[in-house]
Amino acid sequence: MLAATLAAPGKAVNSDCFYTGPLLVLDRLLIPNRENAMTILINGIVQFSPADAEAAMVEAAQLMADTRDQQGCRHYVWSIDPARPGTVYVYENWECEADLAAHLAGPFYSGMLQLLGKYEMLGTDILKYETAKAGPIYDETGVPRADFFATVDA
């Protein structure tokens, strides 16, 4: 069963991305109520030859780990699709635009570009999204739901 409870008010993150209200705790996931900030999601695919995909992801592992330590980075992973050789899925979750901007201007992003430049990319389809809502998948009875039945600002 998924439990949702309110925690203490949040903390300042930076001048452009800050929490103002209580945190909603959803199965150990903190989702803050914020002003001047919306979660930024990045997802898509990069297509390599199968051998290049494997090599690039092994080489990129430390950059991914280091990126996760950046301010505002909730999730950052590039992963190989085991059913589609050569396909790498990109998933990033940033607390706000300012945190993403700092990442894009920083050494881990430029390092990833340099690393990936050693391999032939056959195609890319990556988009960023600004989210306004977040909520649990499962309701209090454990049933998965598509509607936003217990939303908080994302």
Image (tube, rainbow, N blue to C red):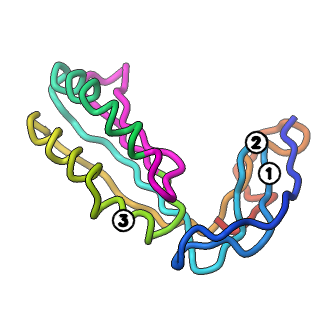
- Answer left or right for 79 relative to 135: left
- Mark 1, other Cα within 10 Å: few <14 / some 14–19 / many ≥20: some
Question: From the image, which quarter does the N terminus lie in?
Answer: top right
Query: In the image, is residue 15 above or below residue 129?
Result: below
Residue type at numbered disc 3: Ala
**In contact (CB < 8 Å): disc 1 and disc 2:** yes
Q: Quadrant of residue 23?
A: bottom right
Residue type at numbered disc 2: Arg
* Image disc number at residue 25: 1
Question: From the image, which quarter does the C terminus lie in?
Answer: bottom right
Q: CA distance from mark 1 to mark 3?
A: 27 Å
Q: Secondary structure at mark 3?
A: helix
Q: Which residue is mark 3?
A: 102
Q: Quadrant of residue 32?
A: bottom right
Q: Which residues are magenta?
A: 68-92
Mark 3 vs mark 2: in front: 3
Q: Nearer the viewer, residue 100 or 89?
A: 100
Q: Which residue is mark 2?
A: 28
Q: Residue at x 36, y 65 (%)?
A: 102
Q: Secondary structure at mark 2?
A: loop
